[in-house]
Image (cartoon, rainbow, N blue to C red):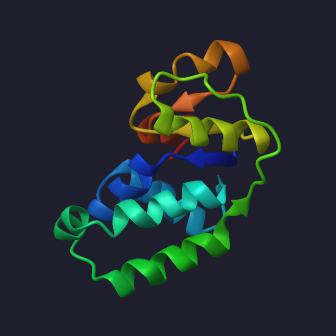
Amino acid sequence: MKRLVLDTSVIVSAFRSSRGASFVILNLVAKRRLVPLVSTALFLEYEDVLQRPEQREVHGLDPSTVAKALKELAALCEPIEQHFSWRPQLSDPADEMVLEVALNGRADGIVTHNVRDFHQAVPKFGIPVLTPGALLERIGK
């Protein structure tokens, strides 16, 4: 399992705490052991959420530091073009773009703190949906 779609919840958690599984996942990305798949829309969501004042209060990073970190992350991501749309498939429309990146990019899995939001996609498409902790267990970290 190497090519993954990281839900925004994972990125936000990694920025908020250096002690959790999400942070370990970003370190594995930095070491090129995992490859995040992103669309432009998904990456813009990462940026939008991380730059919100309530998020900056928690992670304590100024906007320029967040921008620099995201630029570094972008260099490690594989961009995915959206050739096909399967909407609607999920109960939460905000999660549709994560699923579409996974499907269009033929991802090995989706990593999210909201596994329940994706339960409808697993039987239809066979894409594993894992929490950050479950991913680390699966890859032996």
Q: Nearer the viewer, residue 108 or 57?
A: 57
The location of residue 101, given as percent across then percent down, is 68, 44
Residue at image coords 46%, 60%: 46
Q: Nearer the viewer, residue 127 or 88?
A: 88
> Would you place residue 94 above or below residue 35 in this image?
above
Where residue 50 sits, quadrant-wise, is: bottom left
The location of residue 65, given as percent across then percent down, is 37, 84
8 to the left or right of 15? right
Pick the quarter of the image with the N terminus. Answer: top right
Can residue 42 be spotted in the picture? yes
Residue at image coords 29%, 57%: 19
Where residue 75 sits, quadrant-wise, is: bottom right
> Would you place residue 68 above or below residue 33 in this image?
below
Q: Nearer the viewer, residue 64 or 126?
A: 64
The location of residue 87, given as percent across then percent down, is 65, 28
* Residue furthest right as drawn: 83
Residue at image coords 67%, 27%: 127
The location of residue 135, given as percent across then percent down, is 52, 38
Total numbered labels placed on residues in the image: 0
Where residue 61 sits, quadrant-wise, is: bottom left
127 to the left or right of 94? right
* Residue furthest top as drawn: 123
